[in-house]
Image (tube, rainbow, N blue to C red):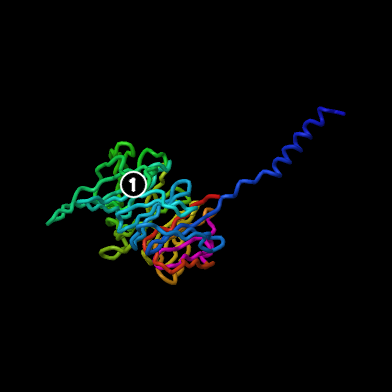
């Protein structure tokens, strides 16, 4: 018998047998996350078009707002209780695993929609508005950033606190884990470790020729699946050929959380207001939603398609393969559209028909 020939065959047979009995790793899958009043958090299978988990959020007090998933997709951090508490809910069990009560006796603290989780999942960055409550007067205190350990349990306290500018409406963590962005009148970048202001770039002060100062409503911190935050901006376009006072123009802000690149692109004379936007995985399209679903071509910077929606939707997201677009917020359904044709493919109705309001429609991708 030729043992030199037999040995590789035996080894191949053994490996085949082992592979046959060992379970294969489960394929990663898209899941939508949203919330609704008074105190619900939902995990949704968009392929099956149904809610697969319906969790109660302790202490929500009829307020469910911004949702930020952990990087591994296992925890959803939710701003609740009139913006005075952030809770972390395990998305498999529904168990509350984190709680940060921001206010304290004599001091009312609110996070008005601006918080983020660091790329390693270990800390929350929270923007805080503060008011000292006196017996006969209220005193407005300077705003600040507070950083919490996500391992802080149900009685989490700040690890560090830094001074912050006023009127911040969104916080986004940079992918290198060394800094974070704060969006307000302008775009600020701060050191995560020290709180030092590293850079300030224009939003209100964008200094674009023939454009007025822009207006932006950035309440929905959607950066999946590309790691790029996008938001519409509105300004008046002036210059040759425009009437006195200018014409309304819609532009798109794009912030790459990996490189820090900040771009602005005009794409239409304003025809329909857009609240939130999402960039497709191939980065060729941006989808925006409010009273209409708008498809923007990023290679030519024009509107490639637009359809009216049956009612207002505040938040928009997209599948990880770029084939479906989801719109949610404002009422109790999530509508599904074909990303190529903008044809409606289905609806997912939330149990009890609670109002999503400004709850963020997020996408996680996991087994």
Direction bottom: furthest residue = 310
Residue 161 position in % (x across, y down): 27, 42
What residue would you read off at disc 1? Answer: 155
Q: Which residues are magenta?
A: 322-342
Residue 133 falls left or right of residue 302? left
The N terminus lies in which quarter of the figure? Answer: top right
Residue located at (42% from left, 43% from top):
121
Residue 292 position in % (x across, y down): 42, 67
Depth check, front residue: 143 or 101: 101
Q: Quadrant of residue 328?
A: bottom left
| Secondary element type, mark 1 | helix
Please check the rendered image and state whether residue 327 is part of the magenta-colored stretch, yes or no. yes
Graded by Cα atoms within 10 Å as few (under 14), some (14 to 19) or many (20 or more), the crowding at tag 1 reads few
Residue located at (40% from left, 41% from top):
122
Q: Vertically, is 340 above or below 14?
A: below
Residue 325 falls left or right of residue 161? right
Residue 235 position in % (x across, y down): 31, 59
Please check the rendered image and state whether residue 106 is part of the magenta-colored stretch, yes or no. no
Residue 206 in sight from this viewpoint: no
Q: Vertically, is 278 above or below 180?
A: below
Q: How many marks?
A: 1
Residue 19 position in % (x across, y down): 69, 42
Depth check, front residue: 313 or 17: 17
Q: Quadrant of residue 47?
A: bottom right
Direction right: furthest residue = 1
Q: Vertically, is 248 above or below 123?
A: below
Residue located at (28% from left, 38% from top):
196
Residue 64 in sight from this viewpoint: yes
Residue located at (32% from left, 43% from top):
147
Depth check, front residue: 360 or 223: 360
């Amino acid at each position: 018998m030729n043992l030199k020939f037999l040995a590789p065959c035996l080894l191949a047979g053994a490996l085949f047998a082992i592979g046959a009995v060992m379970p294969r790793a489960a394929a990663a899958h898209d899941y939508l996350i949203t919330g609704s009043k008074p105190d619900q958090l939902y995990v949704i299978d968009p392929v099956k078009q149904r809610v697969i988990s319906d969790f109660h959020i302790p202490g929500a007090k009829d307020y469910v707002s911004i949702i930020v998933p952990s990087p591994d997709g296992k925890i959803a951090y939710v701003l609740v209780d009139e913006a005075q508490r952030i809770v972390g809910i395990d998305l498999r069990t529904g168990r509350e695993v984190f709680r940060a009560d921001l206010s304290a006796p004599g001091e009312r603290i609110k996070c008005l929609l601006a918080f983020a989780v660091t790329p390693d999942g270990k800390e929350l960055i929270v923007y805080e508005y503060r008011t000292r409550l006196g017996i006969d007067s209220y005193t407005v205190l300077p705003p600040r950033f507070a950083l919490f350990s996500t391992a802080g349990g149900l009685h989490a306290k700040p690890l560090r606190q830094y001074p912050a500018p006023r009127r911040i409406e969104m916080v986004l963590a940079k992918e290198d884990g060394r800094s974070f962005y704060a969006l307000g009148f302008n775009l600020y970048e701060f050191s995560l470790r020290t709180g030092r202001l590293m850079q300030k770039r224009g939003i209100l002060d964008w200094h674009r020729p023939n454009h007025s100062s822009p207006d932006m409503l950035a309440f929905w911190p959607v950066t999946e699946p590309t790691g790029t935050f996008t938001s519409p901006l509105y300004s008046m376009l002036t210059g040759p050929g425009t009437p006195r006072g200018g014409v309304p123009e819609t532009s798109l802000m794009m912030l790459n959380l990996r490189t820090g690149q900040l771009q602005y692109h005009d794409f239409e004379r304003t025809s329909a207001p857009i609240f939130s936007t999402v960039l497709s995985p191939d980065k060729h399209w941006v989808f925006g939603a409010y009273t209409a679903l708008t498809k923007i071509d990023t290679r030519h910077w024009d509107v490639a398609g637009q359809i009216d929606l049956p009612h207002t939707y505040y938040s928009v997201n997209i599948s990880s393969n770029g084939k479906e677009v989801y719109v949610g917020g404002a009422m109790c359904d999530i509508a599904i559209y074909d990303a190529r044709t903008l044809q409606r493919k289905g609806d997912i109705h939330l149990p009890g028909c609670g109002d999503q309001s400004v709850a963020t429609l997020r996408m996680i991708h996991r087994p």
